Image (cartoon, rainbow, N blue to C red):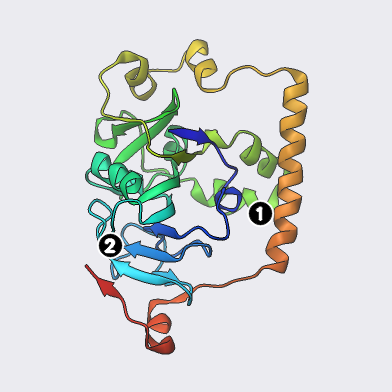
Amino acid sequence: MINRNPYDRDDLKISKKDRVLEVGPGHNPTFRADVIVERFLESNYHRCGTVKVYPHQEIINANGEALPFKDKEFDYVICNQVLEHVENPADFIREQCRVAKRGYMETPSLLGEFLFPKKSHKWIILYLDNKLILFEKSRMPGNYENNYGELFLNYLPYQSLTYKLLWLTEGDLMLNRCEWKDDIDFVVNPTDERYTDFFTKPWSRKMVEQLYPRRSASKEFKKVAAAFYYMIKNKIKNKTHKHSPISLEEYMRLKGKQIVIV
């Protein structure tokens, strides 16, 4: 079940002894991962740059819908901005839960997909009732041609303190960020109007409050203070722990490492 909504990939509950898998990191792998799985090594259609990897990691060329690992072989699996791309999301999610005990799943939110859409995204994903609701993008009304990602992803997070605080305090506006244990509850192409209305109709106040319940002034202040503290702590941490991934070509030359193809 989904038991936590972290700020980002730097806020995950991973211990030093955990063996960590990352599926589909593309150009932006997580340093903490021990093994990474990448399906498309040459095509950048599903990502914003060429594949990168850290020297300490093992890279395996495989499909995330049929992972070449034993049951619960990993303590933790990270899946960042991948689920929205896959052909069979049910198989993909079940594979995450099969090979790992716990994990982190991040996707664009329903609103995030409107603000920074990608042609390679097949699914729009809503986080509601502690589950992921996946709706096929081709069935959605709306314009997905205007991509404002340069503003909302690449500019404001680095230039605006108030926007950064908004990103941390109301992160679900842009992203679904779910840490889970044992399994993930999900629905693919729902028929229940409780879910379909979010994808196909204007949002009422009742619907808005389902996603963003009212908070007291004290809870609001605590949320902002905690986000500000996290932002400062993470900035200091990133200055003292700098790691840079390398290209696939550099990785293959380094120490004679090879890519495992499954």
Marker disc for residue 158: 1
Residue drawn 43% across and 87% down? 254
Mark 2 secondary-structure assignment: loop
Mark 1 secondary-structure assignment: helix
Q: Is residue 121 visible?
A: no
Q: Amino acid at mark 2?
A: Arg
Counting from the top left corner in percent of width and height, residue 100 is at: 38, 50
Image quadrant in which you'd find residue 73: bottom left
Image quadrant in which you'd find residue 237: bottom right
Front-most of residues 9 and 217: 9
Q: Nearer the viewer, mark 1 or mark 2?
A: 2
Q: Is residue 231 above or below residue 208?
A: below
Front-most of residues 148 and 234: 234
First reached walking from the N terminus: tag 1 or tag 2:
2
Q: Is residue 255 above or below residue 64?
A: below
Which residue is labeled 2 in the image? 39
Q: Amino acid at mark 1?
A: Tyr
